[in-house]
């Protein structure tokens, strides 16, 4: 039975489906916000593989918080490099970032042995990608 708002009379309403007891809109937003706050990329496996390759005899045991902080460092470096690549591409008047911008950003931001290894890895990665040939 339902009450009519205007007259105050009780009306008999046929039984239908019960209202869905789901997650409200505000709760969905909270779940989505919590999910989006986590880092989009995770480099845990890459860091552990790098440690295994570097210390082949006995790789050191690294705790979870240390790996997490290393992941954050890698994410920060990648964010900085991508931002600088974007600026360089904009100054040249391009809409796409290509090899020249990436190598220039690496040369500007990194130094020493890290720079040489990064440039070597970039060149190897580009060499592995098959080039588009005109058909």
Image (spheres, rainbow, N blue to C red):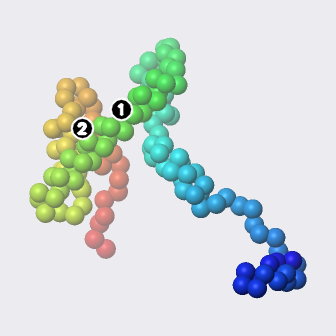
Residue 56 lies, in percent from the top left, at 47, 19
Q: CA distance from mark 1 to mark 2?
A: 19 Å
Q: Nearer the viewer, residue 68 or 53?
A: 68
> Residue at 23% of width from left, 25% of height from top?
113
Residue matched to label 1: 73
> Farthest residue toward the front?
7
Rendered residue at 21%/33% (across/down): 110
Furthest residue toward left: 92
Q: Which numbered disc, 1 or 2, marks the residue closer to the eye?
A: 1
Q: Nearer the viewer, residue 17 or 103?
A: 17
Residue 119, numbered circle:
2
Rendering coords of residue 94 (x, y %): 17, 63
Question: Do labels 1 and 2 touch, CB within 8 Å?
Answer: no
User: Which tag, 1 or 2, sits closer to the chain's start?
Assistant: 1
- Classify 10 Å Cα crowding around label 1: few (below 14), some (14-19), many (20 and above): few
Please report the residue visible at 11 percent of the width from the left and 57 percent of the height from the top. Answer: 91
Say what secondary structure mark 2 lies in. Answer: helix
Q: Is residue 52 visible?
A: no
Q: In x, y percent, where is residue 75?
A: 37, 39
Residue 21 on image: x %, y %? 75, 62
* Element at label 1: helix
Quarter-of-image position of residue 118:
top left
In front: 50, or 2?
2
| Placement of the N terminus among the 4 image quadrants | bottom right
């Amino acid at each position: 039975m339902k009450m009519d708002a205007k007259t105050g009379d009780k009306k008999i309403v046929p039984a239908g489906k019960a209202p869905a007891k789901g997650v409200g809109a505000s709760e969905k937003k909270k779940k989505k916000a919590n999910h989006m706050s986590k880092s989009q990329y995770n480099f845990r496996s890459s860091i552990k593989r790098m440690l295994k390759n570097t210390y082949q005899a006995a790789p050191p045991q690294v705790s979870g918080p240390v790996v997490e902080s290393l992941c954050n460092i890698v994410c920060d470096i990648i964010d900085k490099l991508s931002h600088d690549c974007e600026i360089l591409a904009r100054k040249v008047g391009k809409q796409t970032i290509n090899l020249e911008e990436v190598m220039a950003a690496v040369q500007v931001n990194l130094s020493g042995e890290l720079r040489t290894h990064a440039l070597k890895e970039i060149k190897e990665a580009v060499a592995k990608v098959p080039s588009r040939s005109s058909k």
